[in-house]
Image (cartoon, rainbow, N blue to C red):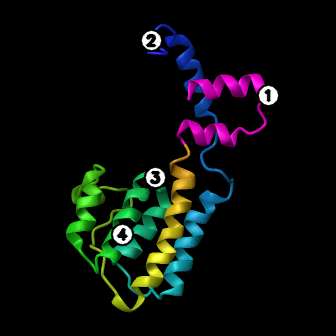
Amino acid sequence: ARWKDRGGERLVWRLLLSCVPRGSRSDDGQAIRDYILVIMQKYQLKKRKGDFMEQWHQKLHNNTTPDDIHICEAYLQFLRSDGSLALFYEHLEGHGITRERLQTFERPILQEPVFFPSIKNGLINEFQHYLEILKNVHAGADLEKCLDAAGGLDGNLRGILEAVI
């Protein structure tokens, strides 16, 4: 209701906020590409060509998107449930990502994840950290994160933006 009579101002604010870069640090975008490789090398996952992890890695390197947050969350559920594919796909589908959609990415994900009990706990720790990196980049569009990223605002303008939020 706040913006009902002020549609023009709302558009201006949206355009201004679209100029704020995503993520809290400028190197997080590169960290998405780098850290997946660190995990794959540490747990020797790169040796398994053509599997889920290799295909997701290719997608991340080519075109990371907010979908990757949900893919990572689903993979964490898969690990925590000792390899339940039902929970993996249930989480994805709850966020609008079907098996068919996974297969239509520019770098498609055609395979299902494989469960490795001996490295489960290590992978959970690594992918929990990786999820934070993904969220720093892709969840950065929310207004509060944008306001924090725009730290040097004068008090009056910051007050206005805080009121909008």
Label 3 secondary element: loop
Percent from the top left, x then y, of residue 133? 56, 61
Image position of 55 with respect to 150: above or below: below
Residue 75 tag number: 4
Label 4 secondary element: helix
Q: Residue at 37% x, 62% y: name it.
A: 71
Q: Kindly identify which residue carries mark 3.
A: 65
Left or right: residue 14 versus residue 77 is: right
Q: Residue at 58% x, 39% y: name it.
A: 144
Left or right: residue 117 versus residue 151 is: left
Please give the range of residues in magenta: 141-165
Tag 2–tag 3 contact (CB < 8 Å): no
Q: Kindly identify which residue carries mark 2.
A: 4
Amino acid type indicated by mark 4: Tyr
Q: CA distance from mark 3 to mark 1?
A: 32 Å
State which tag comes first along the sequence, 2 or 4.
2
